[in-house]
Image (cartoon, rainbow, N blue to C red):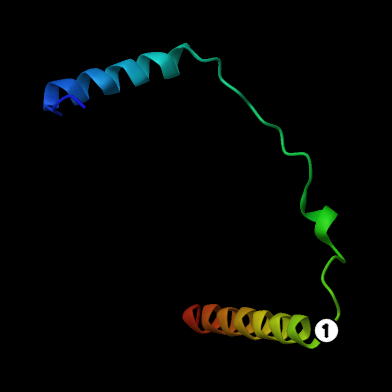
């Protein structure tokens, strides 16, 4: 393997940038949105605990926001 120098690294980066700029831009449209996951969680103890924790955190954030505006 040849010795790495700043000049050799700069040349490698320049080559990569050139190759990258020659590639056409790709735009990937999302195929799903949040509605595709509604109802996919199992109804078990873990899921109920997780949702309860999320609700507690959300309520604590709402309460903190209310107190900041007073």
Q: How many marks?
A: 1
Image coordinates for residue 20, horizontal then vertical, percent: 43, 19
Where residue 62 appears, as percent x and y from the top left, is 60, 79
Classify mark 1: residues with Cα within 10 Å, few (<14), some (14-19) or many (20+). few
Q: Is residue 37 left or right of residue 25?
A: right
Front one among 27 and 6: 6
Q: Is residue 46 left or right of residue 67?
A: right
Q: Quadrant of residue 27?
A: top right
Left or right: 9 with respect to 34?
left
Nearest the camera: 54 or 66?
A: 54
Q: Residue furthest top?
A: 22
Q: Residue furthest front?
A: 1
Q: Which residue carries the number 1 mark?
A: 44
Residue 63, given in percent of the width and then of the height, sits at 58, 84
Element at label 1: loop
At x 79%, y 45%, the residue is: 32
Classify residue 35 by image quadrant.
bottom right
User: Residue visible at 55% across and 15% down?
Assistant: 24
Residue ID at (58%, 85%): 60
Q: Is residue 19 above or below residue 69?
A: above
For the point 21% across and 27% down, the residue is 1
17 vs 58: above or below: above
Q: At which x and y percent is residue 39?
A: 87, 66
Q: Is residue 25 above or below residue 70?
A: above
């Amino acid at each position: 393997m040849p010795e790495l120098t700043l000049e050799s690294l700069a040349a490698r980066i320049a080559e990569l940038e050139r190759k990258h700029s020659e590639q056409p831009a790709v735009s990937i449209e999302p195929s799903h949105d949040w509605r595709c996951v509604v109802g996919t969680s199992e109804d078990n103890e873990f899921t109920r605990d997780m949702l309860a924790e999320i609700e507690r955190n959300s309520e604590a954030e709402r309460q903190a926001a209310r107190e900041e505006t007073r």
